[in-house]
Amino acid sequence: MATTLVRPRPATPGIQRPHKAPALRHLGPNWYASVMGTAIIANAGATLPYQVPGQRVVCQVFWVLAATALAVLLTARAGHWLHHRDQARAHLLDPGVAPFYGCLSMALLAVGGGTLIVGKDLIGIRAAVAADTVLFTVGTAIGLLAAVAVPYLMVVRHKVEAHQASPVWLLPLVAPMVSAALGPLLIPHLAAGQAREAMLLACYAMFGISLLATLLMLPLVFGRLIVSGPLPLALTPTLFLVLGPLGQSTTAVNSLADMAPQSISPAYSGAFAAFAVVYGVPVMGFALLWLALAAAMLVRAARGGMGFAMTWWALTFPVGTCVTGAAGLARHTGLSAFSWLAAALFLALLTAWLLAAANTLRGLLTGRLPAAPR
């Protein structure tokens, strides 16, 4: 009987297929903060009480930059979901990343609002109204979805502890407030009567959604600081995110008060104007208190060796909302102090944007960004 010896084939280790578009693998939703921070310069600069020659042209340039960055990021994020679905799902299940999905909504809304504020000078009023209608509708829908979905995931899927509380948790809750602040821009372009009143009251409803949700979350953030001490160095700039709901809510009540006379009966429009001041002044006072605290913590972190991270963009949009809030109070009170405050905060906003944008551009050119989370 003949015996045939068969040499066994050597085991081949599993070969992992390389990911397509590897540069997009770690491109998270936090990158939309750069669009928000750029758009707010256009929006805030165009509504400042003080205007200098060429200021509106500069605001138009920033709007073009924001709109271009938004288009590029939307395309890149679509590629991220197409080629790196596992990483995209991991982002949703990460309590440190999932809240940044609120930034998508706010980026759409900020660019849409800027289209009506300064973009209309370049593309015409009809195109601006059409573009803002689309961006506002989509941004508001995403914002309301994020305001429900992200807290839901935090409750049922994320495993978080009290010491992990972060100002980042506020991001999906602030998105409806941005809709409340920018929705009034569309009111003059709606039919008089039911349509305008519905938009006005819908914006007030979103103001309430965001405000009450923020009041639930903010004590967790402050309590974490008191009990567990300062945030890690790289996360210290996120303390400025608390300014977002404060400045944006002040902006919202003032913008809504501007539109109330042409949207609702005089019996209510006068009350809305009074509410803008009665609410806005105390909240702006607390915003300045938090700004001082966050700035002190930022200086401490810088002295401790804090390097650049994408969290630096948290120094832009929230400060910009305080600019627009102070400008709104200047309109309704007539106080020069609020005009000076808006101008001073705008200078701080420009400085923060230059630092964040320069370091982000350097990171992109050197290939260090987008980087894997550490």
Image (cartoon, grey):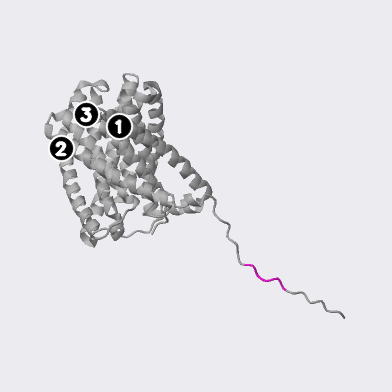
Q: Earlier in the sequence, mark 2 or mark 3?
A: 3
Residue found at the far top of this picture? 192
Q: Position of residue 241 (x, y in %)?
A: 27, 47
Q: Earlier in the sequence, mark 3 or mark 1?
A: 3
**Residue type highlighted by circle 1:** Val
**Residue type highlighted by circle 3:** Val
Q: Position of residue 155 (x, y in %)?
A: 37, 53
**Residue type highlighted by circle 2:** Val
Asked which quadrant contains residue 339, the reply is top left
Give the CA separation, mark 2 to mark 3: 27 Å
Magenta: main secondary structure: loop
Which residues fall within the magenta stretch?
Answer: 8-12
Disc 2 + disc 3, Cβ < 8 Å: no
Residue 74, placed above or below residue 230: above
Residue that carries the numbered disc 3 in the rendered image:
52
Q: Earlier in the sequence, mark 2 or mark 1?
A: 1
Secondary structure beneath dot 2 equals helix
Residue found at the far right of this picture? 1
Residue that carries the numbered disc 1 in the rendered image:
58
* Mark 2: few/some/many CA within 10 Å (<14, 14-19, 20+): some
Which circle, 2 or 3, is nearer the viewer?
3
Residue 267, placed above or below residue 140: above
Residue that carries the numbered disc 2 in the rendered image:
281
For the residue pair 135 and 115, the one nearer the viewer reads as: 115
For the residue pair 223 and 57, the one nearer the viewer reads as: 57
Q: Determine whether, in the image, residue 107 is placed left or right of residue 22.
A: left
Q: Determine whether, in the image, residue 279 is placed left or right of residue 97.
A: left
